[in-house]
Image: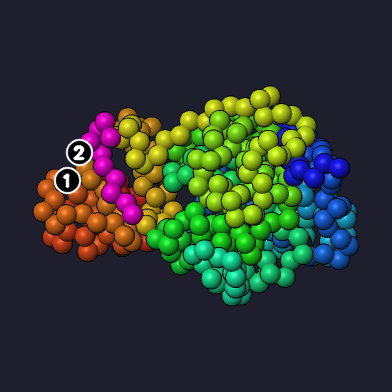
């Protein structure tokens, strides 16, 4: 008997076509045994989205709502008594606005399911007996009360990690304050510790429209047209990273999760059903804040412990400047951000202190942009 974890990879033709997407979702789940092996009549189901910001799924930044519609229909057919769609947008972004602009408000109304902004949830403290960094973490009551968690991340590059996938997507459930703290406590291990108490029963990685470049919010959409599913999130992430042309070992949180027993991160020990990795593999490019594209203009990023709010905002500004062929206008500038960032007191040169955490760095020097995170328009006004 083959006891290897199973991961399915299927084509999703017509990513805008509900029926075609639904067929792909059903096919993907059938290859791993079907949702019927996990979901029982009367269960409460939580579908965890990937909505870091109010951006259409066609940008590659957010979950395709057709996938979620298919999961709702299937869960209901199997007898789920309560179905919840939930997310907590990235720091500095409005989840309710993301629900509206990404189509999930309409979807929830049409399907008569609950829509939950985790930023407004009642949080329940959970002990993590085997946590390496975290011993306790607060998670939404909706998650604690759910029998089945279905995780629907988008396949994207990331400015901190080579890729953001299933394990990383669960960070969206926690309070905003803890999201910021993760970056100073050790982001990778915090993600792993969180998943020790919040590991999904099923992960369906949305590769219908993925993202490369300056992910996870401001990159370039990739019309990949695939779904990757598994009851083993670590295995799903491993296969997805290989499809992206990324070594799973280079994604620290994924390597740690495999080493600490959250799932299988060794491709030779994973059974891939449907399409094989080489049939759909596509090398994803990555552009990060510290990349040579910016260094060649003399732009330096000094960040330590910066949360995704500030990093995403700075990425958005840089992306806009690059697309407008204006990046050279902020050449020879040092940006400092993050809770643990440091800069020598005798620093000389053009300095931008980015966000509330950087306020006290080099007193009396440079420009300070307040905010947690700063507003992009304030940043543009300051740097140009």
Q: Is residue 163 above or below residue 110?
A: above
37 vs 264, nearest the viewer: 264
- Report crowding for label 2: few under 14, some 14 to 19, many 20 or more residues within 10 A (C-alpha): some
Compared across the picture, whether 364 is left or right of 115 comes to left
Of callouts 1 and 2, the N-terminal one: 2
340 vs 55, nearest the viewer: 340
Q: Which residue is mark 1?
A: 350
Q: In this rendering, does residue 224 appear at all?
A: yes
Residue drawn 82% across the image and 41% down it: 2
Q: Are marks 1 and 2 in contact (CB under 8 Å)?
A: yes
Quarter of the picture holding the C terminus: top left
Residue drawn 50% across the image and 40% down it: 250
Q: CA distance from mark 1 to mark 2?
A: 7 Å
Q: Is residue 165 above or below residue 374?
A: above
Residue drawn 39% across the image and 60% down it: 184
**Residue 8 point in image, percent of width and height:** 75, 38
Q: Is residue 134 magenta?
A: no
Q: Which residue is mark 2?
A: 332
């Amino acid at each position: 008997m083959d006891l290897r974890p199973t991961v399915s990879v299927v084509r999703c033709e017509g990513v805008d076509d509900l029926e075609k997407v639904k067929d792909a979702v059903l096919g993907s789940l059938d290859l791993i045994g079907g949702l019927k092996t996990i979901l029982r009549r009367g269960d409460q189901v939580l579908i965890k989205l990937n909505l870091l910001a109010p951006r259409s799924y066609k940008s590659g930044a957010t979950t395709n709502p057709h996938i979620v519609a298919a999961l709702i229909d299937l869960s209901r057919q199997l007898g789920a008594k309560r179905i919840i769609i939930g997310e907590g947008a990235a720091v500095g972004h409005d989840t309710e606005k993301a629900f509206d602009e990404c189509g999930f408000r309409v979807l929830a109304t049409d399907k008569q399911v609950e829509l939950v902004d985790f930023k407004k949830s009642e949080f329940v403290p959970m002990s993590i007996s085997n946590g390496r960094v975290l011993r306790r973490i607060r998670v939404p009551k909706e998650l604690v009360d759910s029998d089945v968690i279905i995780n629907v991340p988008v396949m994207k590059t990331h400015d901190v990690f080579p890729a953001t996938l299933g394990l990383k997507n669960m960070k969206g459930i926690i309070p905003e304050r803890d999201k910021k703290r993760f970056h100073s406590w050790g982001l990778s291990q915090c993600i792993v510790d969180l998943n020790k108490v919040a590991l999904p029963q099923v992960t369906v990685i949305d590769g219908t429209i993925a993202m490369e470049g300056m992910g996870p919010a401001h990159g370039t959409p990739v019309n990949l047209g695939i779904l990757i599913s598994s009851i083993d999130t670590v295995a799903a992430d491993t296969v997805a990273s290989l499809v992206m042309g990324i070594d799973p070992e280079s994604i620290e949180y994924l390597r740690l999760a495999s080493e600490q027993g959250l799932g299988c991160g060794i491709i030779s020990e994973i059974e891939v059903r449907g399409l094989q990795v080489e049939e759909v593999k596509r090398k994803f490019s990555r552009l990060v804040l510290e990349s040579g594209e910016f260094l060649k203009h003399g732009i330096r990023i000094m960040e330590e412990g910066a949360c995704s709010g500030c990093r995403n905002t700075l990425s958005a500004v840089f992306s806009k400047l690059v697309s407008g062929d204006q990046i050279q206008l902020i050449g020879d500038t040092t940006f400092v951000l993050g809770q643990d960032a440091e800069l020598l007191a005798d620093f000389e040169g053009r300095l931008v202190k980015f966000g509330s955490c950087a306020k006290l760095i080099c007193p009396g020097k440079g420009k300070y942009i307040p905010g947690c995170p700063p507003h992009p328009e304030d940043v543009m006004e300051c740097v140009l």
